[in-house]
Amino acid sequence: MSLLRPLLLDVVPTIQQTAALALGRLANYNDDLAEAVVKGDILPQLVYSLAEQNRFYKKAAAFVLRAVGKHSPQLAQAIVDCGALDTLVICLEDFDPGVKEAAAWALGYIARHNAELSQAVVDAGAVPLLVLCIQEPEVALKRIAASALSDISKHSPELAQTVVDAGAIAHLAQMILNPDAKLKRQILSALSQIAKHSVDLAEMVVEAEIFPVVLTCLKDKDEYVKKNASTLIREIAKHTPELSQLIVNAGGAAAVIDCIGSCKGNIRLPGIMMLGYVAAHSENLAMAVIISKGVPQLSLCLSEEPEDHIKAAAAWALGQIGRHTPEHARAVAVTNTLPVLLSLYMSTESSEDLQVKSKKAIKSILQKCTYLPALEPFLYDAPPNILKHVVGQFSKVLPHDSKARRLFVTSGGLKKVQEIKAEPGSLLQEYINSINNCYPEEIVRYYSPGYSETLLQRVDSYQPLAN
Amino acid sequence: MREAMATLARLQARSKAVGQQYYFRNSVVDVFRKKENDAAVKIQSWFRGCRVRAYIRHLHRAAIIVQKWWRSYSSRQHYQLVVKLAYYTMKMNLYNEMAVRIQRRWRGYKIRKYCFDYFYLKEYLRAVTETNDAIRDALEEFAEMKEREEKKAALEREEKKRDYQARKMHYLLSTKQIPGIYNSPFRKDPDPWELRLQKAKPLTHQRPRVKQKHSISLTSWLACTSNRSFPRSEILPPINRKQCQGPFRDIAEVLEQRYKPLEPTLREAEPINELKEAREDLRRQEWIRNVNDNMFLPFSSYHKNEKYVPSMHSSSKYGPNSYGCQRFRDENPKKWICPKDFQTVLPSFDLFSKYGKLYSKAGQIV
């Protein structure tokens, strides 16, 4: 480091540039080396000469700043402390697009770490210049500027509001149609970071007329474009029912469901969560999700995904869909997901989060489920706390439906209910009593356990009439 | 007289009997007297009782009549009240019943028409399914179009590659004497590569690329001491040149004038912050040169333990004079609003004319 330092001030400009490039590559590799660069007091010199030198030097110096700033917040703070932000912002006004790209990249990496650093970047006046950079014709510059805006706006609503006030949304929305995949990734990520903070910001993003264009991004070949697009839709849908309604009206639910079907793994996760948020707002929206054929897809995700957190998200989404009315619960139960949820709840390998979510989903669906064929398997292998709800549902449905009563007897459900041991006076016992009251007493006695023994005892004690 | 004496004797003889008889008759009467007395008492008491009872009965009848009339009167009053109440209750029940009917109808209508219109919901769900199908078709089309475009682009790239290959392998074309590799005489048709080779134009040699001269930017006019600083023409003018016809100067003079080095005035030569820049320059030189940045203190300063004695002017008990300290361009950072200096404002863009007016303010009162 002490050898490179004097080379930075050499007379020959090529040597300066190469020295700066070497420093940048060293700092890029490892954060200890970056700390050594900071401790070697090189940054003030770089910042000073950044203002005056030619564009190659500026690019190299911005590369050094980026390489140092990317490792940790303390190093980025060191860069801010030596006054680099003002010079980087001046570089953003340069004519050469390479310089602008390097400066924007450095600013993006600095702003990534936390909210104070982002605020410092914004205070240096970077945001309007970044918005200007987005409008430039070079694709690489657009990408970097979009990623920098995304990093700035992700920390807090005020920062996002600053980005919006600079007029970024209109330009970002225009560029969704650009064919370059990496650019689309950054644009969608920037829009989703803006939209996630509050309802007003989400409404502003929606007013920029991104629907239905965003839905075409869900069909893109690039996996991360799909992921970021579904993240954006999720962030918009989660705020209010009106926004979810807007998305459903534009056909977003179907597009997301298709997108879930075509991906695997972590890419699916934002799409699954989006369906859960939409269904959670109101029962009409949940019904809209059901008729868009969302439930079979979600149950497929639940059964075939290996990762626990994706399964937990799918379980939560199914619970949100099924908890509103008996029709919703029936739609969920018909696809045979309830046994899968039960097995996830009971298995010891599932993480705690997955168990909690599947239990909640089962409970909320069961409390509204009147579709008896789906409930019957639960009588056999459910733990007692869930069994209580199942028996309760039976006791609600059976008194009114004679066909169901017959089916219940013939399928062996009545026998199973008699075998359940419940404490007298508990809720379970009350449910069992109300079920028993639906049937004539002989049948109840016939199916109660140990009936064959009592019959045999009667045979033993019977004295035939002596003729 | 004898008769009288006889009677007396007789009477005296009978007087004992009379006494006895008298006593006897009295006692007999006494026996009966009690009985008779009792009987008389009984009769009298009975009679008196009858009389009193008749009187009481009479009184009772009178009281009954009075009470009867009074009770009938008060009951009639009460009855009227009861009837009034019952009538009122009946009327109110009727009104309630009618009101319930109206409200039932109205509530049913309101819920079905405005709050939860079932048919509207069905319509909405049907519309959502239609939109979904439309979107799914559109997206399928879009994906197909992208596929096609990509395939086309891939094909074109392949084509270009093969074309370039053919151009490079042009020498493998078959001639009349020698059939090329791709045109074996045992084949019925020539190989497609053969046709491609026939169509391809041979590559020419690469011309040497003209090297671009990169211009050296000048940090300051005074620093351009090298010969390469100034732009020069590549070809020097010939030594013996025919003088151009016309009022032109000598070429050597012109060139000399043109390439005369700059002689700035003293004002230009010495910039206004020359001293500061010289200091900075010196500092930079030292920074390059020095291995250690700490100041090297002379040993003699170890002996100097003297405390600084301030001058009288600045150490008076009334404080320093404000004239010259606080009135000529004195800076008092404690009084500043914010620690940063004023910043230059960027030239105004059209961008900021739309500040705050571009997006709708949903929910705020305009």
Image: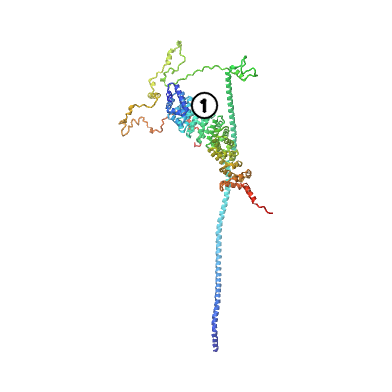
Q: Chain of mark 1?
A: A
> Could you tell me how many numbered marks the image carries?
1
Residue A297 shown left or right of residue B219 in the figure: right
Q: Nearer the viewer, residue A324 or A252?
A: A324
In the rendering, at what x and y percent does residue A348 appear? Answer: 55, 38
Look at 58% across and 49% down and name the residue there: B97
Q: Amino acid at mark 1?
A: Val
In the rendering, at what x and y percent does residue B307 appear? Answer: 32, 31
Q: Nearer the viewer, residue B330 or B306?
A: B306
**Above or below, A64 relative to B11:** above
Q: Nearer the viewer, residue B185 or A216?
A: B185
In the rendering, at what x and y percent does residue B87 appear? Answer: 57, 53
Residue B133 shown left or right of residue B242 in the figure: right
Q: Nearer the viewer, residue B362 or A16?
A: A16
Q: Which residue ends up furthest to the bottom in the rendered image?
A: B2
Q: Which residue ends up furthest to the right in the rendered image?
A: A467
Residue A5 shown left or right of residue A259 in the figure: left
**Above or below, A190 relative to A393:** above
Q: Which residue ends up furthest to the left in the rendered image?
A: B312
**Above or below, A111 relative to B31:** above
In the rendering, at what x and y percent does residue B247 appear? Answer: 44, 12
Q: What residue did someone put label 1 on?
A: A139
Q: Secondary structure at mark 1?
A: helix
* Callout 1 crowding tier (Cα within 10 Å): few <14, some 14–19, many ≥20: some
Quarter occupied by the N terminus of chain A: top left
User: Is residue B350 visible from the viewing direction of this image?
Assistant: no
